[in-house]
Amino acid sequence: MKLNDLIKQNRSNHYKMLVIVDNNKQHQKIIDKLSNDGWVAYDVTKNIVEITKGVPDGKIKLRIGEQIKKWVKSLPNKIILYNTNILYSPELGRLSPIGAFKYKSRDREIILFVEGHTSGNRIRYSIYERDDYSEMDVGELIHVRMEDIDA
């Protein structure tokens, strides 16, 4: 699939969030390709660490959703989010990257990189019974494996 076709398809989707499963950390290829088209990339782990500074440890799970919402609202209209694995951590309430950003993507375009294994309209992260295990439904989203993109 061509990257430009995926982006066009994504623009007409209710949730304007293109999910790319990238287990080999090749997101930089997409970032480099789109940086001249108004897309801006953000390291989610780095930003989550920043936005949770000052939040008491016992309150992070309760406040992380609101903190992410404020952060995303401050971003431009075309964003690329990568390095998202921090969201699966028990300390953050085992958010999934899709759950954290899906409803924020209606008023902006988002390309979201996640790690995991695809199975139909589901992406599984980690191993069942581990603290960071997550299974995400991507049936409403445009989603593709990185190796299937012709950038």
Image (cartoon, helix red, strand yellow):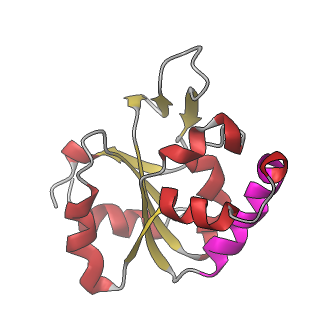
Left or right: residue 61 compared with residue 74: right
Q: Residue 5: x and y, percent?
A: 28, 64
Residue at 49% x, 44% y: name it.
Answer: 85
Q: Residue 105: x and y, percent?
A: 59, 66
Residues rendered magenta in the picture: 60-74
Left or right: residue 151 compared with residue 103: left
Residue at 26% x, 47% y: name it.
Answer: 146
Left or right: residue 131 compared with residue 9: right
Inspect the magenta stretch and tell me whether residue 38 lies in it.
Answer: no
Could one spot residue 109 in this view of the protein?
yes
Residue at 38% x, 29% y: name it.
Answer: 117
Q: Main secondary structure of the magenta part?
A: helix
Q: Residue 28: x and y, percent?
A: 24, 62
The correct choice, above or below, for 103 with respect to 109 in the image is: above
Quadrant containing the C terminus is: bottom left
Q: Nearer the viewer, residue 98 or 142?
A: 98
The correct choice, above or below, for 36 with respect to 86 in the image is: below
Q: How many marks?
A: 0
Q: Nearer the viewer, residue 121 or 80?
A: 80
The correct choice, above or below, for 108 with respect to 49 in the image is: below
